[in-house]
Image (cartoon, helix red, strand yellow):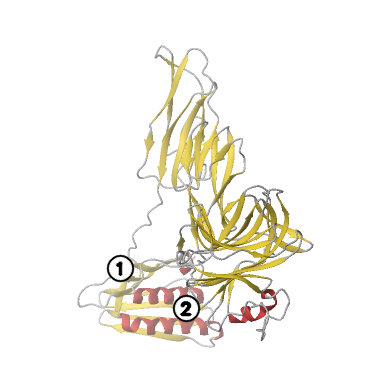
Amino acid sequence: MTPRRAGLFGVLLAVGLLACGKDPSPKASGPVRAQLAAAADSVLFQDDFSSGIAYGWTGQVGTWAVAQDSGTSVYKNGNASGDNWAVYGPATWTNYAIEARVKPLSFQSTGGIVRVFCRWQNATNWYYVNLRNTGVVQLRRYLNNAIVDLAPSKALAISPNTWVTLRLECVGSSLKAYVNGVLQLSATDTLFKAGPIAVGGWNDLAEFTAVRVVALGGAPPPPPAPVASVTVSPAADSLAIGQTVTLTARTYDATGALLTGRAVAWTSSASAVATVSAGGAVTAIGAGGASIAATSEGQVGRAAITVLAPPPPPPPGIAHVSVSPLSVAGGLVPGISRITRFFATVVDSTGAVVAKPVTWSSSDAMIATVDTAGWVSTTGVGTAAITAATSNGFRASGLITVSAAVPPRFNGVYADLTLRNGHIKIARRDSAGSPPILVTAGDTSAAGFRVRTSTALLHAAAVRQLAGDLASRPDTLRFQTANALGVDSVFCAALGCWVTTAGPGYAPWTSTPLVSAAHLVGLAHALEAAARGDSIFAPGDSLPYLRTVP
C-alpha cells in the first residue's frame, strides 16, 4: 500500500484502528476515547509500508528502513542511541490528528522514549507525545532545544514488544494525546500553527505502522503531488581523473509539472570510478564508466559519467600531434562519401615535423566515419570529433558538423505521367484572372486547359469513377473537357484508357501506351492536392505523382 489520501469512506473503514479493535463510540462514563472525524473531515495520509518503500518520508535522523514483523510491514528505527525521527507531509497541514501503531522494542538503561509529532517546524521546534520507559505519558512542546511540559505527566505503564496506538490531535490551540483510544492528556498552546508529522523516539529501538493523518475541523490543503519522474542534467559528461561536475535533479508530477523542495538521494553505480555527494557533486576517481542515480520518492533519474584514462607519458623525442582543420561545418549533409579530409602533423621536441603514422577515429560513427587516410564520409546529423592518435598516446581532434539536408522547394508540379509520345501533367500556377490549376496533355507542344479549384474535385471524382469502372467496362466510355484552347477527352475500355487532345494551332494527339486504373487514381489524387494547394508531402502521400509508363 503506497501513501495515499482517502475520503470519508476511508475514515469509516479505519474506525477499528482508532480504538485498537475496541468500540470507539462515546460512553456515558469512563475514559474519553478518540472519536471519528466529522463529515467535513478527511484522511489526508495513511501508510502501512506494505509497498516495501517509505515514499515521501524525509528528514530522517537515525537509521530507518521498512522491515517485516510477523507478516506486518513496519517502518523501523535501527539507531538505539540518541534522537531518531522521520518526517512526512507539507508545511500547510494545520488542524489534524496523527495516529500510529507503535511497538517499542528496547530502551537504553539510562532511559528512553517512543513518540509521535505534530506541527513539525524543524529539528528543534515541534509538539509531541511521549511514552517513557519509566511508565509515564507526556504532552510536550520543544522550542529551540528547550522542553516545555504542556500538561502534567501521567502514569501509564508500557511493555517492550507490545503494540500501542498513539494519537495526537492538534486543532487550533487545542492539543490532545490518546493512548489506545483513551484520552490521557490535553492542553492549549498557540505557538505552532501548522506543519507536517513525524514519528520517532530517543534512546530506543521501535517499529511504526498504520500511520494515518486525519484532518479535523475542515479539510486543509491536500498533500503535495507525488513525484512521478526525475531528470538529471547534464544527462552525460566526460571527466578527467580528479575533475568534478555538479549534477542537477528535477522532479515532476504525473502531469509533467515541476515539483520543488523534494528530497533527492544520490548514488553512484561505481564508486571506484566516480563518487557523488549528497548535493549531486560528482568527482572522477578512476577510468571507466559510472551511472549516477538521483532517487526521489521511489522515482529515479540517471546521468552517465565517463572518466577518461590519462594519456600515457610520451616517448622521448615526440612533443605533440595536431589536426587540421580544427573545424569543418556548413554545406555538409548526410550520405556524402569522402566529403573532406583531415590532416595530422606530428612534431618532435625540437619543433620539427616528423613522419609518424597516426590512427584515425570518429567519436560518433552515426554522424561521420573516417578512413585510414583521414577522409571523412557523412552518415547522420550532428557534430563528431575526428581524432588522430599516435602509437605512443598523443591525440588531437578536429570537429565536423553535419546538418540535415534541406528538401528542394516544391515547383508546383503535382503530377507528371511520362508516356512514349508525351506527358500528362497537372500543375498549379496562381496568377490573377486565371484558374490556377493547369492540366496539359501531349508532346512538347502540348495543349492544355485551366481548372478552377471549385471544380477540380468534380474532375478528380470523375477520373476516380473511370478507374473504378475500368475492369468491368463492356464498352468504351468517354469523359471530355472543352474550353477555348481545345478539347481534351479520356477514353476508357476494359484494357485501359487513352487521352486525346485537339485545339487551335495544335496537331491532334493521342497518348500511348494505355494508361492503367492505378495511373488514373494517381492523377485524381494529384488534382485534389493541387486544388488544396498542398506544398509539403509526407512519404505516404505518393506525391508529387511522377511515373513513367513503359
Could you say where residue 136 lies in the image, as x and y percent from the top left? 66, 62
* Label drawn at residue 445: 1
* Label drawn at residue 154: none
When the figure is inspected, residue 184 is found, relative to residue 68, above or below; the finding is below
Could you say where residue 199 lies in the image, as x and y percent from the top left? 61, 60
Quarter of the image for residue 18 reads bottom right
Most foreground residue, 28 or 485: 28
Asked if residue 2 lies left or right of residue 317, the reply is right
Which residue is tagged 2? 497
Judged from this view, the residue extending furthest toward the left is 432
Q: Are marks 1 and 2 in contact (CB under 8 Å)?
A: no
Most foreground residue, 52 or 237: 52
Neighbours of disc 2 within 10 Å: few (<14), some (14-19), many (20+): many
Give SS at disc 1: loop
Neighbours of disc 1 within 10 Å: few (<14), some (14-19), many (20+): few
Query: How many numbered badges does the structure rendering display?
Result: 2
When the figure is inspected, residue 129 is found, relative to residue 16, above or below; the finding is above
Which image quarter holds the N terminus? bottom right
Going 47% across and 40% down the picture, which residue do you hit?
245
Label whose residue precedes the other's in the sequence (1 or 2): 1
Going 67% across and 49% down the picture, which residue do you hit?
79
Could you say where residue 88 lies in the image, as x and y percent from the top left? 56, 61
Name the residue type under label 1. Answer: Ser
Name the residue type under label 2. Answer: Cys
Q: CA distance from mark 1 to mark 2?
A: 22 Å
Let me know if residue 289 appears in the view.
yes
Quarter of the image for residue 36 reads bottom right
Quarter of the image for residue 438 reads bottom left
